[in-house]
Amino acid sequence: MHSVRKYPKPKFEGWKLAKYSSALQIFQTLGSLVVFILTSSVGSQFPPTYAVLLTSIFTIIGAAVFVICDAFNFNKTEPDEWIFWESVFTSSFSFLFTVNTMTMLYSSIRWNNTAWWLATVVCSMVTMSFFLSLIHVMRKQTKGHIALTQEKNIVRFNTRMNRRV
């Protein structure tokens, strides 16, 4: 007989919103909203600021989805796949917000607009929160189920005799 792994059914647990990872994702959502409002309030004289607006919208949606899924315990239903998608999200948006910070810094220097200076500061803070989130996710990934079970599946060879150990 095959053993069926049982995962908990999703249910809302409000205390999960007080976790470190949820706090970072809430900050990413709110910070991206502020960056979007500040950048769009000026208008775009520089085409890459459209990329900043688009990245902010995707971050608002993505981080909000991760917070909601974490609060409803969806990440416990398939923990191995969940940590993979969370690491893809945080690593890609860490890079994109680094580019956004540089874009907004250039735009702020070039056009000297106060709203864009504030957007640069908030964008750099969101970038730091993404890097902190990335470090947190990578720690979870190295302690997760896949990392622990893959260790015993590694075939090791004795280098001197070239035989399996």
Image (spheres, rainbow, N blue to C red):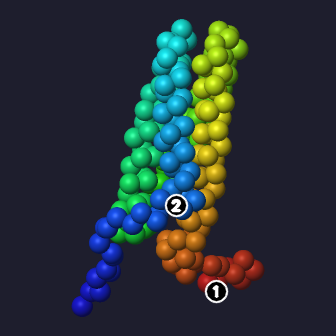
Report if residue 143 is visible in the image.
yes
Residue 155 occupies quadrant: bottom right
Pinpoint residue 15: horizontal percent, then vertical percent.
46, 65
Q: Which residue is mark 1?
A: 165
Q: Residue at x 32, y 80 (%)?
A: 5
* Rendered view: 65 above or below 21: above
SS class of the residue under badge 2? helix
Pointer 1: residues within 10 angstroms few (<14), some, or many (20+)? few
* Rendered view: 116 above or below 122: above
Q: Residue at x 29, y 72 (%)?
A: 9
Query: What is the spatial separation of the Cα atoms under label 2 and label 1, in whole angstroms?
Result: 47 Å
Q: Amino acid at mark 2?
A: Ala
- Where the N terminus falls, by quadrant? bottom left
Q: Which residue is mark 2?
A: 18
Nearer the observer, disc 2 or disc 1?
Answer: 2
* Rendered view: 120 above or below 128: above
Q: Residue at x 46, y 39 (%)?
A: 59
SS class of the residue under badge 1? loop
